């Protein structure tokens, strides 16, 4: 089977367009197709593409993140049996229409669909139907195949007679009848081929799939796709087609709107131009001259474009984050948030074969879960049906705009902070800034802004940052069980649970008699600030107990509440729990002291902490690796709660090596069984410290060897 360049079935060099041509959406002489109606519902039109995630991992994401955050759709990578190999592109060389790829079998796919539906999330299946493979061998499900022979599906006569690679994008026949980078091209004009493809799509529909992304649709005649769609049992299923625009090319995206939506690649290249060296003030007309809003699916990047350089990627830091914020706030199109993984080689396949054990670990980026992105999904749902209003810009790289009388966003791409009074159409009131806090129980865990009777509010927006307000995300004091942190504390980039000094700790033991599936500790050191809701995850201690050790600095205790991570709280009847230092317990509403596990049977998942006075065992510790881009003069450090990690003192943070830039690496000796919390920071030559965002990272050193931590900087 092919193992190198021919297997990468992509053609993005032909798709890169000059911005001067952004307005040219239809080639000369083309007739616009009538538009289809199978578009996402207006209230929840945001898709999250979880690229190369196993179906079991997608199911958990639907329950834990996508549903609660308001995503309408999740797009999953191809389910079809495909050629063997660890590279990502093997998923795009099918060898049968069995659900037997690396991401899961039929049962796991069915479970994913059911779980996502229960969470209010619809499922889009990525369907590879333009072609089969580029060679011969045995597939991931055991099917033996040849390039033009797929038993039970297709034989030689079912493929186009042009057996050479596409060479001329100005020739429609060459584009749609010849082979995309050497992949056997199905004769989609054949009634038999159309019905066989429709049978596969119908099979997915029987499993509950709500729509399809048609891969490489540009290489299938729009009329052939219409014929296939007419044979599908649910003609109203959502369709989005991958048709890459090329100026002056024979095949244009507008031809496909009669079948459904189309991925609008120009929207992404436009964003890169503005956020990477251009002016975001020029985005006032974003979408003008492209496909109509009702037919366009917008995105910042995808797995192809992040590898060929035509769009922004996670490696662009705050520019990437802000582009996602802008896309979700803007009324044009239906947004698709891409969530992939860190890679150093363009061929790199998914970490752990697609299994996501936790976000931000093993290289999984989890863009869909970033607060700055996820909270804008709620923003978009809240402002649905409104147009863009109250545009403001400084003429360069700071902008603000409203969504009718329902929302307002300000974005600063300048190199320094911006203080500005913004005119909005919002009703007077106090609003949660969902870029830096979460709206909870009618309140806010972060900073709030007051809009006056004249619709104005004043904000200082940091460099590379944004502010977003919308009706329904209120402010004022946050309802129990979440206390009201000050705006400055909530906006701080210091780690959740970081100490105010050095010394005191508390190990909080909490009874598991509530039988929750997860336990989080939401706390504040006495006189300090609260962690971000839902707090920090607790770990198994022994039968009947979970625990969490937290650093208190100079504080003499902490206020605490507990929750299951999904809205169920134990806040001591609204009074919070007042706890001291050392080993403390909470059970049945009563507090106590001591270690309830001292004589209990240890849970198999519990790990004993090594004595602080003992030296690490030979070879035990943590291997840190973080993908982080830096400016000239900046370096990356790791700091954490363990003494060996500086005890949250950034002056004692450990420098990582840039020898494998942009991946920074460091091995640290730690006792076997040690549980750590840590975060990465950037330092410049002047000693200025920039913390990465998000909750503290956690890890436990194994009984032997090192725990490998493959992380991505969180902007």
Image (cartoon, helix red, strand yellow):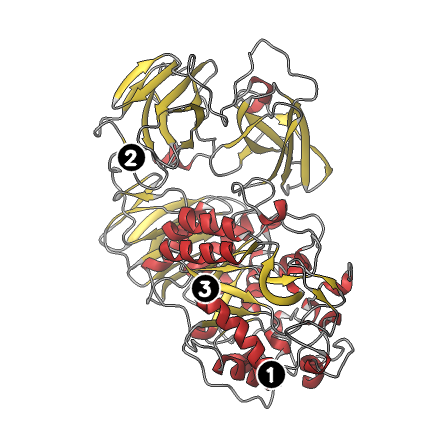
Q: Which of the labelled discs sits on residue 366, or is there none?
A: none
Which residue is found at the position 22% from the left and 26% from the top? Answer: 575
Q: Position of residue 435 (x, y in %)?
A: 41, 46
Q: Which residue is mark 3?
A: 207
Question: From the viewer's perspective, is residue 83 above or below residue 666?
Answer: below
Cβ atoms at labels 1 and 3 below 8 Å apart: no
Using a 10 Å C-alpha cutoff, classify the residue at mark 2 as few (fewer than 14 neighbours), some (14 to 19) or many (20 or more).
many
Judge left or right: residue 9 versus residue 583: right
Q: In the image, what residue occupies the spot 34% across and 62% down? A: 403
Mark sitting on residue 192: 1
What residue is disc 2 on? 569
- Among the two numbered marks 1 and 2 on one chain, the one whose residue lies closer to the N terminus: 1
Residue at 24% across / 27% down in the picture? 572
Per the model, the C-alpha gap separating discs 1 and 2 is 57 Å
Q: Residues within 10 Å of mark 3 (few under 14, many from 20)?
A: some
Q: Of callouts 2 and 3, which one flags the residue occurring earlier in the amino acid sequence?
A: 3
Place of residue 676 in the rendered image (x, y in percent of width and height, measured from the top left): 53, 25
Q: Are marks 1 and 2 in contact (CB under 8 Å)?
A: no
Which quadrant holds the N terminus? bottom right
From the viewer's perspective, tell me whether residue 297 is left or right of residue 140: left
- Decide: few, some or many residues near mark 1? Use Cα within 10 Å; few <14, some 14-19, many ≥20: some
User: Viewer-proximal residue, 560 or 145?
Assistant: 145
- Which corner quadrant of the image does residue 255 belong to? bottom right
- What secondary structure is marked by label 2? strand
Q: Secondary structure at mark 1?
A: helix
Residue 108 screen position, x and y as percent: 50, 54
Front position among marks 2 and 3: 3
Alpha carbons under labels 1 and 3: distance apart: 23 Å
Gap between marks 2 and 3, in whole Å?
A: 35 Å
């Amino acid at each position: 089977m092919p193992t190198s360049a021919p297997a990468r079935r992509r053609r993005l060099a032909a798709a890169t367009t000059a911005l001067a041509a952004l307005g040219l959406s239809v080639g000369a002489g083309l007739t616009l197709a009538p538009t289809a109606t199978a578009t996402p519902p207006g209230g929840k039109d945001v898709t999250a593409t979880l690229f190369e995630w196993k179906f079991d991992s997608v199911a958990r994401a639907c329950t834990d993140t996508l549903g609660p955050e308001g995503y309408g759709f999740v797009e999953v990578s191809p389910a079809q049996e495909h050629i063997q190999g660890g590279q990502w592109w093997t998923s795009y060389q099918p060898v049968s229409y069995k659900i037997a790829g690396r991401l899961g079998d039929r049962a796991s796919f069915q479970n994913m669909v059911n779980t996502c539906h229960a969470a209010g999330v619809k499922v889009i299946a990525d369907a590879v139907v333009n072609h089969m493979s580029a060679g011969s061998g045995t597939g991931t499900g055991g099917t033996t195949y040849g390039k033009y022979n797929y038993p039970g599906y297709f034989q030689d006569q079912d493929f186009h007679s042009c057996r050479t690679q596409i060479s001329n994008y100005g020739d429609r026949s060459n584009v749609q009848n010849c082979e995309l980078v050497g992949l056997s091209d199905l004769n989609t004009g054949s009634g038999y081929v159309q019905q066989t493809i429709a049978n596969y799509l119908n099979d997915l529909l029987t499993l509950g799939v709500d729509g399809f992304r048609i891969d490489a649709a540009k290489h299938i005649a729009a009329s052939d796709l219409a014929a296939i769609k007419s044979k599908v049992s649910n003609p109203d299923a959502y369709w989005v087609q991958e048709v890459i625009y090329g100026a002056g090319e024979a095949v244009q995206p507008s031809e496909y709107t009669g079948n459904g939506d189309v991925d609008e690649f120009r929207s992404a290249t436009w964003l890169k131009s503005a956020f990477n060296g251009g002016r975001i003030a020029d985005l006032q007309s974003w979408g003008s001259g492209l496909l109509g809003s009702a037919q366009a699916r917008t995105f910042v990047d995808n797995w192809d474009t992040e590898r060929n350089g035509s769009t922004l990627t996670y490696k662009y830091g705050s520019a990437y984050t802000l582009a996602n914020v802008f896309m979700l706030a803007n009324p044009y199109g239906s947004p698709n948030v891409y969530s992939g993984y860190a890679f150093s080689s363009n061929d790199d396949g998914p970490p752990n074969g697609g299994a996501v054990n936790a976000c931000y670990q093993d290289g999984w980026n989890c863009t869909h879960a970033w607060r700055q992105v996820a909270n804008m999904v709620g923003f978009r749902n809240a402002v649905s049906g409104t147009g863009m209003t109250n545009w403001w810009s400084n003429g360069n790289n700071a902008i603000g705009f409203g969504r009718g009388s329902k929302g307002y966003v300000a974005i600063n791409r300048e190199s320094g902070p911006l203080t500005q009074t913004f005119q909005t159409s919002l009703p007077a009131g106090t609003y949660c800034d969902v870029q830096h806090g979460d709206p909870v129980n009618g309140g806010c865990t972060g900073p709030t802004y007051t809009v006056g009777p004249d619709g104005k509010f004043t904000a200082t927006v940091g460099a590379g940052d944004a502010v977003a307000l919308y009706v329904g995300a209120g402010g004022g004091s946050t309802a129990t069980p979440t206390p009201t942190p000050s705006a400055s504390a909530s906006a701080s980039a210091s780690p959740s649970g970081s100490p105010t000094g050095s010394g005191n700790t508390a190990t909080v033991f909490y009874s598991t008699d509530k039988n929750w599936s997860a336990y989080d500790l939401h706390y504040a050191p006495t006189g300090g600030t609260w962690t971000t809701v839902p707090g920090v995850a607790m770990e198994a201690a022994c039968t009947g107990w979970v625990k969490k050790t937290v650093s208190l600095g100079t504080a003499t205790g902490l206020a605490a509440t507990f929750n299951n991570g999904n809205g169920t709280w134990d806040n001591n009847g609204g009074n919070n729990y007042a706890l001291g230092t050392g080993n403390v317990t909470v059970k049945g509403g009563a507090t106590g002291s001591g270690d309830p596990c001292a004589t209990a049977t240890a849970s198999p998942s519990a790990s004993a902490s090594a004595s602080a006075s003992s030296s690490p065992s030979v070879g035990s510790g943590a291997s840190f690796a973080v993908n982080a881009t830096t400016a000239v003069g900046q370096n990356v450090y790791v700091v954490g709660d363990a003494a060996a990690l500086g005890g949250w003192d950034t002056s004692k943070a450990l420098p990582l090596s840039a020898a494998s830039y942009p991946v920074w690496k460091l091995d640290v000796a730690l006792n076997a069984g040690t549980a750590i919390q840590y975060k990465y920071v950037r330092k410049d030559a002047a000693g200025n410290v920039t913390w990465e965002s998000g909750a503290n990272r956690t890890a436990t050193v194994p009984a032997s060897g090192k725990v490998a931590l493959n992380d991505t900087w969180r902007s």
